[in-house]
Amino acid sequence: MELIKIKSIKMLRHNYREVVFVFLAFTLMAAAAYFSVGQILRGRLLDRAEEMIYTAEANVRAGFSEAETILLNASIFVQSMIEQGASKQEILDYLISTTQWMRQRDKGLLKYYGIFGYIYGDFLDSAGLNPGNDFIPQTRPWYQTAVRSGIVVGYTTPYIDWRTNDTIVSAVQNIFDNDGRIIGILAIDVEISWLTEYINSLKMASGGYGILVNQNMTIMSHPNHAYIGFQLQDLGSSYNEIARTLLRGDDLFARKATDSIYRSTIVFFTRIFNSWYVGIVTPYHQFYKDLYTSAAILIILGLVLSLLLSYMLLSISAAKMRADEENKYKTSFLARMSHEIRTPMNAITGMAELLLRGELSKEARSYAEDIKHAGTNLISIINDILDISKIEAGKLEIIPSKYSFSSMINDIINIIRMRLAEKPIQFSANIDENIPDSLIGDQVKFQQIFLNILSNAAKYTAQGYIDLVVKAEKRVDKQIWLKITVRDTGKGIKPEDQVKLFGDFIQLEANKNLGIEGTGLGLAITKRLCLAMGGDISVESKYGKGSTFTVIIPQGIESEVKFALANDQEKNSDSSGMVNFTTPHARFLIVDDIITNLKVAEGLLLPYLATIDTSQSGAKAIELIKKHEYDLVFMDHMMPEMDGVETTRLIREWEKEQENNTKTRKQANEKNLDFQHRRQIPIVALTANAVSGMREMFIEKGFSDFLAKPIDVPKFDEIIERWIPKEKKQQIVNDETETNSANIPNPKDLK
């Protein structure tokens, strides 16, 4: 006893020295944070302001883009009618029909009152304005704005509509003859209460607000409505210089100014698409108050964290001594350690993330990425330890609830596909259509079982394939037994090692698997979760050739709605990653300015075995289309410089030129080709703008089909089925010994 007491005193003295060291280290870190965190947080606030102001620009552009498109198209059409000698009544009839069409499809932010015009000295009342005999168009804001606007679309300052008392602006477009003289004006009145509400809501801190001014520095939106219609310079002397800067065409970022009520503010302005300016005003003291309050909080948290970590060292040390003295405290020690270390580890990974968002040298960024990666792996290990300790402590609870089986399967497949993205592994999933979609069980733990066995397969499979099969094994009343089979072409397991596979902290052949991270707890946790849920797990394996894990789990049935889709699509097209045919002789083109989006679409197309090209711009896409013959093109909508609509228009014009080209026609006839049956290149619009009416708009613009982002896999497969010619499809033979689903080609045949 005396010896144990002496050892305990020495250990405590040693730990106190470590505690003092940790406390001093965190104190120095807190002092360094005091001088550096201000700059870091200020940079983040400026980034936030930049993001907010450019998002505002995009929203305003989106709000007015449809009105501009309608106005420009109408002006071109009316100009053509005038050149062809159309009467004023014919032009009026066209404008009336356009107004009726606009009002029927008015489902966006803008409330349209209709389109009207002033042609050859006559006012064409196509919007039902009925202004009266004393109405003089030349005195109206829309007419005066048009005269000043030249060839571009112009906007009036907001004014009160005499009919409805709504705040409106008029978008105007001049019509010119061949000599460049104005022969008419078209205008659209739109109600913009949404715009003033949106701009006023722009704030970075309490007391902040947004401002919208036009190209003439007239205030279009301000939280104080009394200033609407005033000049920007009227807000105070500081705004004189701001107005001069904006009139030069420059943006203005983080400028200190004094507003109309003599408050010091921080001002941001950026020019938007129609030469207006969106501004964000933030009280100066509030901006920096938040900044240094956050810095002070971070310093305090650093000090508190040092105290907590010091306390943890003592607590863990005491727990370890108790565990050495008596083995029964092992589980308690693991649980406490896992739980208490999680908090500082999250702080470490969080600070690494903050560093990565800032300006770093290449070497410093590499170090920060290594810290974050190591921290993430350590948290994963800690989670495994915590799970196993909870199970051993008898704290594992199975909490059944209603859940969607198809939604869970979709999430699982998406996660595994991401993990396999960098490996030459073909992943397939076959899901029995007889499984009801609405089940009752512990979804979280059931999903953990799926992910554990699939992750294990991914971890030990270098190449080949991983195959997931889920079948309805049997049913009794309102309960169904699901059989989950995962086959892989991984390293396999020796027969003598299979009996040890589900033990704690077991990683077989550790000397050959040094590069594989993990605790060896994944399969042990899976085994215990299966038993706790009334099921079991087993394994069959041939060393060097791969393994097959089989899990059988009972689940309750909430309703009899089947997992399979209600329409006639092939089984497992929904989120299973399976295809029923391949197109090895087809060629696809994906156009998107975001690399991540290109990778996602390319990954979804891989099972079809087609040739896949990608492009990050419309200009490059046109070059590729002129160079190669494509069977299907997926075109992003919003891209810089040349968007998807403009790119598609140019492609269709090029196709028309090719069709009308005499030499091309002659060559086609010499080869006995039927020119009438040559298809246009099918172009599918990819867009995050999925509001009502967008599909029709894209079809009108020359697209062949429409697909909303994020990509819905069943719809993606349906489009490929629809547009790829029958002669380029190769059907895949079904395997009736598995499920009723179609299997993809043998991965060994894939590159």
Image (cartoon, rainbow, N blue to C red):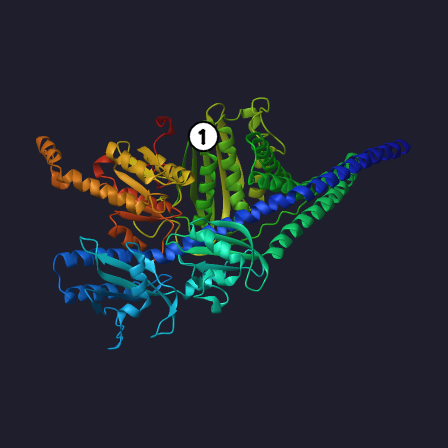
Q: What residue sits right under mark 1 in the picture?
A: 423
Please tell me which residue lies in front, 383 or 706: 706
Q: Residue furthest right?
A: 2
Please tell me whether mark 1 sits on a helix, a strand or a loop. loop
Image location of residue 41, percent across then percent down: 60, 46
Q: Amino acid at mark 1?
A: Lys
Image location of residue 35, percent across then percent down: 68, 42
Determine the residue positioned at 40% across, 42% down: 576
Task: Decide if residue 109 is on the left or right side of residue 656.
Answer: right
The answer to whether any part of residue 497 appears in the image is yes
The N terminus, quarter of image: top right
Please tell me which residue lies in front, 146 or 356: 146
Please tell me which residue lies in front, 305 or 677: 305
Image location of residue 63, percent across then percent down: 37, 58
Please tell me which residue lies in front, 455 or 27: 27
Task: Decide if residue 646 is on the left or right side of residue 273.
Answer: left
Determine the residue positioned at 25% across, 40% down: 724
Which image quarter: residue 624? top left
Work out whether 695 lies above or below 191.
above
Image location of residue 737, percent across then percent down: 36, 36
The answer to whether any part of residue 731 appears in the image is no
Task: Decide if residue 73 is on the left or right side of residue 398.
Answer: left
Task: Decide if residue 512 is on the left or right side of residue 250.
Answer: right
